[in-house]
Amino acid sequence: MPPPPPLPTASLAIMLRRAWPRLRLPSPATVTASRSIWSCSSARSDWGSTMTQAEQAVGSPTSFNNVRNMLGNEMTTIAHLARQLLGSNHPFLHAARGQVFGGKASRSRHVRGLVVLLMSKAVAAAGGSSSRGDGRRASASPASASEPALILPKQRALAEISELIYAGTSVHGTTVELDAATAELSGDGKQDMKFGNKMAVLGGDFLLASACTALAKLHNTEVVSLMSSTISDAAEAAFEHVALTQGPLPVDKWKRMAYLSTASLFAKSCQCAAMLGNRDVATQEAAYTFGEALGFVLKIESEMKEIHERRKTRGAALPLDSLPLSLALAASSLDNDALHTFRRLAAAACNSERTGAAPTEEEQQGHDQLRTWFASTSGSSDALELSTSFANTARTALQQLPSSDSRDILARLVDSSLSATRDTARALAEK
């Protein structure tokens, strides 16, 4: 007897709902309408699998890069003070939970240190010599095939430093404009917001100071110079972001902003990993090129996911300074009045993010119109095309390194991020 035909997904959901009332299954309409969610989940699963392989390759779970584990007892005081902000909705709480003390999303956030460790292993098999930072030259021979590539203690310290710098700049970015943020608050509410700003400034300073102290212990002036410049890059990006969120950015300007805020830390950390391994200049340049391209790929993925999430919420502002929106507006034939309206919406959204103020009804309608318009453009597909170009650059740079499992995992990180961007673009294209 032939087996019965499989039940449709909607019918299966109905049967399970009746059999197990406590199981919160989506309705048949929701199951049919949300097929794109499964593709996005598949991409996240692919990324998680690659991260697990990466952790096994470097011999340390990503949690070792948790800032709390790095700084030990010093973070206990910050955790105690942060509890005073519970209920205030200050952005510092979200940054502390995700970047400093760990959270559900921290495993995917703490990718910088993992990339540094993978690059350290990937370049270990490359021969050559490099400046040691004290004017002398140091040579190194390739690792033998029977000898596993080791990660040097200074390279592991570099991985922690990269995470400290990212956490410090992220915490600094949670300050809010007090005048606007406290306009509708009184008493304890105002004091909480002020205290949250103090925590954001002092907490970020503490993390960056810890990173600088750890940098000095590496005793390599070139590495110190490069890694300290990533802090200035992040600060420059933060200041320019305020002035540039008034509308779409040209691609070259977006690329500069993405480099300062994201790609710089990836690129220079990978280059420093090669430096600390005493690799030659060609290997250092390949490591830098890969890190920069990976940073761009991850930045585009992040912006695409943000647009996808905001598109599902009525009145949510789409980031006009993101690459997909910038490409869509640059290729459009909108008149000056429409562009002026979009810029005004972007300025209002930026102000709301800094102050925590809710958008007005008029602004919500404007954002709804912008989302409807964006759905009819090729902005997401154009951004995917550019992300593919950056991914190809990253793969080309990896080909200049000796073949190894670590190199293959780095390539899979690029592919996983690009796959997630592709799935998000497909979801955005659905009406």
Image (cartoon, rainbow, N blue to C red):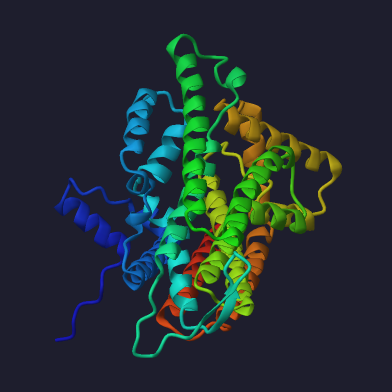
Q: Residue at x 36, y 50 (%)?
A: 66
The N terminus sits in image quarter: bottom left
| Quarter assignment of residue 265 | bottom right
Relative to 365, residue 305 above or below: below
Picture coordinates of residue 246, whole percent (x, y) = 74, 39
With 213 as the anchor, is 4 left or right in this view? left
Estimate the x, y position of residue 143 in percent, counting from the top left. Answer: 43, 85
Task: Provide residue 202's location: percent of width, then percent of height.
Answer: 49, 31
Look at the image and tell me whether residue 225 can be seen: yes
Is residue 261 visible to the viewer in this orientation of the structure? Answer: no
Which of 209 and 55 lies nearest the eye of the viewer? 209
Q: Would residue 274 be found to the left or right of residue 368 on screen?
A: left
- Frontmost residue, 178 versus 358: 178
User: Does 331 sit above or below residue 52?
Assistant: above
Residue 217 position, x and y percent, is: 47, 54
The residue at the point 18 percent across, 51 percent down is: 18
Relative side of 331 to 278, left or right: right
Tell which residue pokes out farthest to the bottom in this image.
Answer: 145
